[in-house]
Image (cartoon, grey):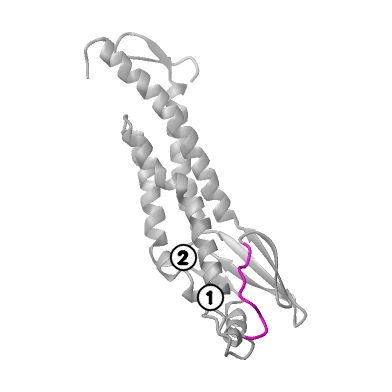
Amino acid sequence: MSDLKVVLADGSQRSLNDFFWPHLLLMLASLLLCLSVFLPFWTLKMNAPQFPEGLKAVLYIDHVEGHVQEIDGLNHYLGMPPLDEGGKLERKVSLGAVSLMSLSVLATLFVHNRWAAALGVPALVFPWIFLADLQLILYRYGHSIDPTSALGGAIKPFTPPVIGIGKIGQFVTEATFGPGYYLSLAAAACVLAGLWMHRRIYREVRAARRRVGLR
């Protein structure tokens, strides 16, 4: 492929690779976004003496799995809402939102002007919006303790860490990112690199057209 050339409007030539790589990166980003919805984005493991094997909450983009009933039972004694209450709206719209982001990234392949960057922005910021929203949900959970509940007076308001080790009363928590989140980060990196290469090559295409009087 390195020997193949594309002739621009003014007769200048560019390697076909210059067009191939941005298209490949953007298509890969779209695929990674689609795959991410099938994998966990975040996991919280809780360890305590009465639960020697620990309790896990595994967060996907649209649902929560793991020891949900057991954790909800603990939350009940603290007067906290069930796990399913946190981020209910986000989970409801997440599949549609990620699908639109994936299609938006693909659409950049057919847009050869500054709007291509705008179409890629949602995929670029998605991992960071997920983190910010998760942090807000965790804060609300940790600050929703009912002091009149069975154990509400024994634990002060808290915010579980988004990543790493935390301590809540007699519980030690360990939060880790899942493969779905890492795929979304990889997709964002592919979009960033793809858009940069896309803009560079099509800026030269437009310049070649202007040199021969085409718009």
| C-alpha span from label 2 to label 1 | 13 Å
Residue under pointer 1: 83
Question: Which of the image's four quarters has the C terminus?
Answer: top left
The amino acid marked with disc number 2 is: Asp
Q: Estimate the x, y position of residue 57 in percent, counting from the top left.
A: 60, 70
Mark 2, Cα crowd under 10 Å, few <14 / some 14-19 / many 20+, is: some
What residue is shown at x 64% (from left), y 77% (from top)? 156
Secondary structure character of the magenta stretch overall: loop
Disc 2 target residue: 62
Which picture quadrant has residue 105?
A: top left
Q: Is residue 135 magenta?
A: no
Which residues are drawn in magenta? 153-161
Q: Earlier in the sequence, mark 2 or mark 1?
A: 2
State the image coordinates of residue 2 (x, y, percent, origin top left).
50, 18
Task: Please name whichever residue, 123 or 169, is drawn nearer the observer in this view of the structure.
Answer: 169
Is there any visible trace of residue 53 in the rendered image? Answer: yes
Q: Secondary structure at mark 1?
A: helix
Q: Nearer the viewer, residue 52 or 125?
A: 125
- Label 2 with label 1: CB-CB less than 8 Å: no
Determine the residue positioned at 49% across, 43% down: 188
Q: Amino acid at mark 1?
A: Leu
Relative depth, front residue between 168 and 13: 168
